[in-house]
Image (tube, rainbow, N blue to C red):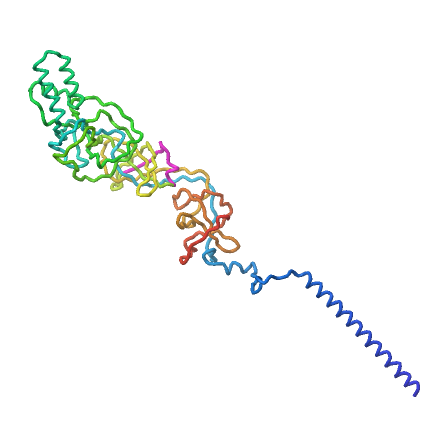
Amino acid sequence: MKRNCTGRICCGSDVGGMLKAIDSVRQIILLISIAFLVASCQNQPKKSHHDIGKIKVDDSLRALIAPSNEQAMAKAQSVMATYESKIFSVEVPGIINYDVRSKVGVASRVSGRLERLYVKYNYQPVKKGQLLFEIYAPDLAAAQQELIYLSQSTADEQLVDKAKQRLLLLGLTHQTIAQIIRSKKVNYRVPIYSPLDGYILEQQLAAVPQSNEVQASSNDSGMSGMGASSTETATTDAVPQVQNMALLLREGQYVSTGQTMFTIYKANQLVAEFTLKPDLSSEVKKGTKLTWHKTAQKDASIQVASIGLVAPVIKTGENFAVARVYIGKGNWRVGEILTAKIPILVPQSYWLPQSAVVGIGAQSVVFKKENGVFVAVPVSTGIKAGGLVQIQQNIKGWKVAKEAAYLVDSESFIPTNDKR
């Protein structure tokens, strides 16, 4: 009994010691955990009250929640730009017009009244020496009476010559002055004749700026009349498109000294004018060869010529250029519609299909593929021909949507990223 009791007392003491040791270990582990927790809380940055309620978005999902007017997700075919030189044959429209480098103005050298008018409408063909109108001028009548008196009452040839010179300065021809001396009668209706063959246009409608004019003295044929100006005007201005409407001048109307009433364009000098778009005008130069024919007669003979002038034009708010080919009379008529083909050599540039570029207002954009989505990026475009468009910037390695129009959001405007 003693041994068993002693054994039981010894076993109880061992169990109690072990329990105390376990409790000590637990307390130590708990203290260490609390210390680590406090340390980690102290190292974490403090959150502002503005961050409350915000959700952090994974970068892989950011493309899915972006607005549809900023980027597009689509299984669209993409293409890359080619970098090469191109030769195109561009087709442009044109028209036969008058060559305004040589024209003559019919003006009045004295004040007077229109007695008779023999031309009726604009662009009426006239021949050299054809009677245009008759004018009554008191100064001319007085000068004629003075010449008749001097030729009859005095033998002083100097006075007679001065009287003749005065009539010449007023516009009368040598033939008319000789007729007045022979008949001894005052001609109250002074005839005015056409100085050349051509088409007449009323000056009020031919409001053409007189820039870059070159004047060359014309010879006195004796039939030009007092209204024919002594200069021919060479200019590069465009001929106004005026219909064959009736003249505004009327018989009985008074005209002043120096007033230009008509402009006569030479009938044997015409010009073919072709309209060029702004992107094409920079590639076309003076001397460029082209082929052209009448649009209404596709089987007609094809003409080959060189461009004589490329002039910028602004009309009704539109900016374009006009290429002019100077031709003779031939079988052409003013107003005939033409079609020309101009060869264009473009040096090495980046080229994309026209379907890959879409215009939004004043900008042209492409949809560049980035991180699995298409983003609208503005580009600078050049000439458009042959189903291709020239890109005037470095887009090497870009993958863009081949059909950009299908990615345009019709419900909103497309903002572009100019930093790309």
State the image quarter where residue 106 is shown.
Answer: top left
State the image quarter where residue 347 is shown.
Answer: top left
Q: Is residue 170 above or below residue 381?
A: above
Quick check: 306 left or right of 29? left
> Is 379 within the magenta?
no
The answer, for residue 267, to whether it is visible in the render is no
Quick check: 171 left or right of 406? left
The answer, for residue 409, to whether it is visible in the render is yes
Quarter placement of the N terminus: bottom right
Q: Is residue 196 above or below residue 420?
A: above
Q: Where is residue 238 drawn, in percent x and y?
A: 28, 35
Query: Most extreme residue toward the bottom, as rendered?
Result: 1
Q: Is residue 64 above or below residue 122?
A: below
Q: Which residues are magenta?
A: 279-293
Query: Most extreme residue toward the right, as rendered?
Result: 2
State the image quarter where residue 112 is shown.
Answer: top left
Q: Where is residue 165 drawn, in percent x and y?
A: 17, 18
- Between 304 and 348, which is closer to the camera in this rendering? 348
Q: Where is residue 68 drawn, in percent x and y?
A: 46, 58
